Amino acid sequence: MAEPSLDARLASVRGSVSDAAREAGRDPGEITMIVVTKFHPASLVRELYELGVRDFGENRHQDAEPKAAALIDLDPIWHFVGQLQSKKVRAVLGYARVLHSVDRTSVVEAIESTGTNVDAFVQLNLTDDPGRGGVDAGDLEILVERVAAAPGIRLLGLMAVAPLGVDARAAFAEVRLASERVRSIVPEAIALSMGMSGDYREAILEGATHLRIGTAITGNRPTRG
């Protein structure tokens, strides 16, 4: 059986997002769907753009930078969703308008040093593994206060990835509760970047405003010969 076409997969996910939003008593229009195009060529981004997608996510600078350069004739909104190295911040800000993975003070300092204005999420680590990326829950307020004090950074809210093997909705509920702590410091930081191809319905039910969806729309990553 042939795999559904790109436009069919996109329409299916858009429909499912709308259904989940209505189930949650929410307006589907308040949810931003970011199509994560990692491992896929610029040509796929161009196809998605022609289908009306404007928000795209990448998690590897070495792949994202040439892709963004190849699509300079378009006006996509690039979201950097991977772990962010301080030494690469300046280069990433050459194309990314939104950073989803601010998780330590050194990254904040690197952003400040560029003099660039950028929208950002603080990433919350929902595991006990520091290698997973994200700030530990116990240090959340400290980092949020540092971001709030940084000129040029507009804090949108929290980002998180549901750990494997746990109930996704419970994980997202934890993020929603943590968001209240963020809003006590930055009241306008109400956004929640959470939910991917396998768990975006649960994320929407817990208040996600930004979804990061890859394979459900793009299909499996292309093989590299």
Image (tube, rainbow, N blue to C red):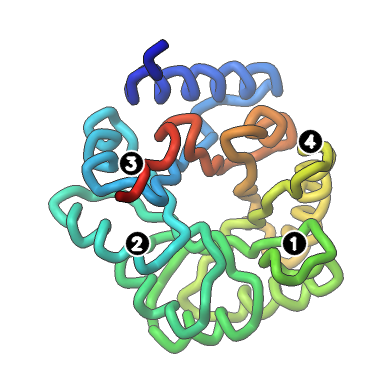
Which residue: 75% across, 54% down?
A: 179
Q: Earlier in the sequence, mark 3 or mark 2?
A: 3
Pointers 1 and 3 in contact (C-beta within 8 Å):
no
Tag 3 residue? 54
Which residue appears at 51% of the width and 82% of the height?
Answer: 86
Does residue 224 appear left or right of residue 145 in this picture? left
Where residue 47 appears, as percent x and y from the top left, is 24, 34
First in sequence: mark 2 or mark 1? 2
For residue 51, above or below residue 11? below
Outermost residue, left direction? Answer: 73
**Amino acid type at mark 3:** Arg
Residue 63 is marked as 2
Judging from the image, what secondary structure is the residue with disc 4 in?
helix
Q: Quadrant of residue 97?
A: bottom left
What is the CA distance from the residue labelled 4 to the residue labelled 2?
31 Å
Q: Which mark is residue 169?
A: 4
Q: Which residue is mark 1?
A: 125
Q: Distance between the Cα atoms at labels 4 and 1?
A: 15 Å
The amino acid type of the residue labelled 1 equals: Asn
